[in-house]
Image (cartoon, rainbow, N blue to C red):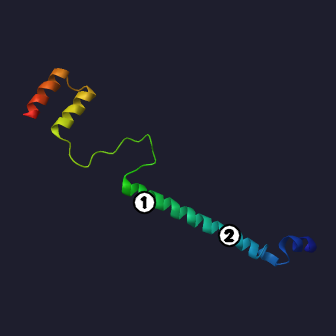
Amino acid sequence: MGHCSEFFTGGRGMMGGGMFGMGIFWWGFLIIVILGVVYFTRNRSNQQTGVDNYPNQEPTKKEFPSSALDILDEEFAKGNISEEEYLSKKEVLKK
């Protein structure tokens, strides 16, 4: 068994592959760090521009308050008010 274990470990004892084993560790560590930097950089740029990676998500609300006409248009579009009511209120708001 001694001869076989020396063949697989390179005769370096308990550390197994020696530099080869540590090389794999450092390459893996480096890849994880690079992926982390890319992930956090993308998330930060998406937050600053307001862009989301989720296409089915509803659009964000406007940052400024809606005008009375905008609210009236939304209510009519939702079907909460009739056409006659919509037109009469729109005339009042335009005055």
State the mark number for residue 1: none
The mark nearer the N terminus, 2 or 1, is 2
Helix, strand or loop status at disc 1: helix
Residue beneath the point at 23% across and 26% down: 80
Residue beneath the point at 20% across and 36% down: 71
In the image, residue 13 sits, relative to residue 43, either above or below, namely below
Mark 2 packing: few (<14 Cα in 10 Å), some, or many (20+)?
Answer: few
Q: Quadrant of residue 89?
A: top left
Residue beneath the point at 43% across and 40% down: 56
State the mark number for residue 44: 1
Residue at the outermost bottom position: 12
State the mark number for residue 25: 2
The foreground one among 7 and 23 is 23
Helix, strand or loop status at disc 2: helix
Q: Amino acid at mark 2?
A: Phe
Percent across and percent down for residue 90 are 13, 30
Q: Amino acid at mark 1?
A: Arg
Percent across and percent down for residue 10 are 85, 75
Q: Quadrant of residue 23?
A: bottom right
Mark 1 packing: few (<14 Cα in 10 Å), some, or many (20+)?
Answer: few
Cα distance in 3D space between marks 2 and 1: 29 Å
Q: Quadrant of residue 86?
A: top left
Percent across and percent down for residue 60 are 33, 45
